[in-house]
Amino acid sequence: MISKQTNVVILTGAGISAESGIRTFRDSNGLWENHRIEEVATPEGWQANPQLVWNFYQQRRRQLLEVKPNQGHEALVSLENHLQNFLLVTQNVDDLHERAGSKNLIHMHGELAKLRCEVCSHVEEMMEDEHLQETFLSCSKCEGRLRPHIVWFNEMPMQMPEIEKALSECDVFIAIGTSGHVYPAANFLHMARRHGAHTMGINLDPPENVYFFDEFIQGKAGEILPMLIEKWTQS
Ligand code: APR
């Protein structure tokens, strides 16, 4: 199914990082690490209680220092190295794909390891010792308050034009570890299909949009991806 010339777009969600020890969203009754989503993942939540939101994301960042990429992340790096045209789009805000070695990567929902100025929108990398601070940090350009570089509910996902272009050109689209509940990511499958791509889903439970995939494999990404990708890259 896949040769060196095949143009592949991958979408990943929380499921790919589950085997590294990061909890997925929808297995926790609408709570994210014991917080209501509206409290910690909306612009209104940030306005209402910035300290709570700041502490919450600092906690998520500290967690990143304790986890490692798994075999699923690593298999996707082998696939990228094998192909001429490859794009990995992730809904995850962790940095496990880049730590595994993925290069052509879009974080459509932002990145835990970055901060953005509320005033001038300048984006800064967070330093490792700053992972521990519970005091706000300010922008190195304008002194404005930095907010998490995270796409909250009701905010626009990042790099959508590039993602849509890649979906319109791909031969194969594969969604991994995502429940298919959150738009616009859940719509990528339909966009790729409309342009004639072959579509594949890999997930522990059947996702919301399971019936629209040409192929669906049920199981753990960290077990399925190494086997599949080894087969593809050796043929
Ligand atoms: N391998 C493959 N799939 C897995 C694994 C695994 N080891 N473990 C869990 N899964 C699957 C679950 O069955 C579930 O369908 O991963 C999916 C994770 O779904 P969600 O928790 O809904 O995560 P995701 O689809 O990434 O959520 C999308 O919602 O809250 C927002 O912005 C947040 O990016 C997130 C978006």
Image (cartoon, rainbow, N blue to C red):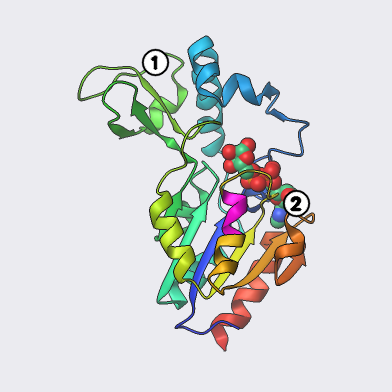
| Mark 2 crowdedness (10 Å alpha carbons): few <14, some 14-19, many ≥20 | few
Q: Is residue 188 magenta?
A: yes
Residue at the image point whose x is 48% and y is 33% from the top: 155
Q: Compare marks 1 and 2 and give the one earlier in the sequence.
A: 1
In the structure shown, which secondary structural element does the residue marked by tag 2 occupy? loop
The residue segment tinted magenta is 185-189
**Residue extending furthest toward the front:** 194
List the single residue furthest toward the left.
141
From the viewer's perspective, is residue 91 above or below residue 155? below
On screen, residue 105 above or below 217: above
Residue at figure coordinates x 60%, y 68% from the top left: 193
Mark 1 or 2: in front is 2
Secondary element type, mark 1: loop
In the rendered image, which quarter is residue 220 located in?
Answer: bottom right
Depth check: give the residue in front, 191 or 176: 191
Q: Position of residue 121 (x, y in %)?
A: 30, 29
**What is the CA distance from the residue labelled 1 to the residue labelled 2?**
38 Å
Residue 117: where, in percent of width, then height?
32, 25
Residue labelled 1 has its Cβ within 8 Å of some atom of ligand 1: no
| Residue 29 image-quadrant placement | top right
Instruction: From the image, tell me which residue sits under label 2.
Output: 208
Please name the residue that numbered disc 1 is placed on: 136
- Mark drawn on residue 34: none
In the picture, the quarter occupied by the N terminus is bottom right
Q: Residue furthest bottom?
A: 235
Residue closest to the eye, 98 or 36: 36
Quadrant of res 32: top right
Dominant SS of magenta comes to: helix
Q: Which image quadrant: the C terminus?
A: bottom right
Dot 2 amino acid type: Glu
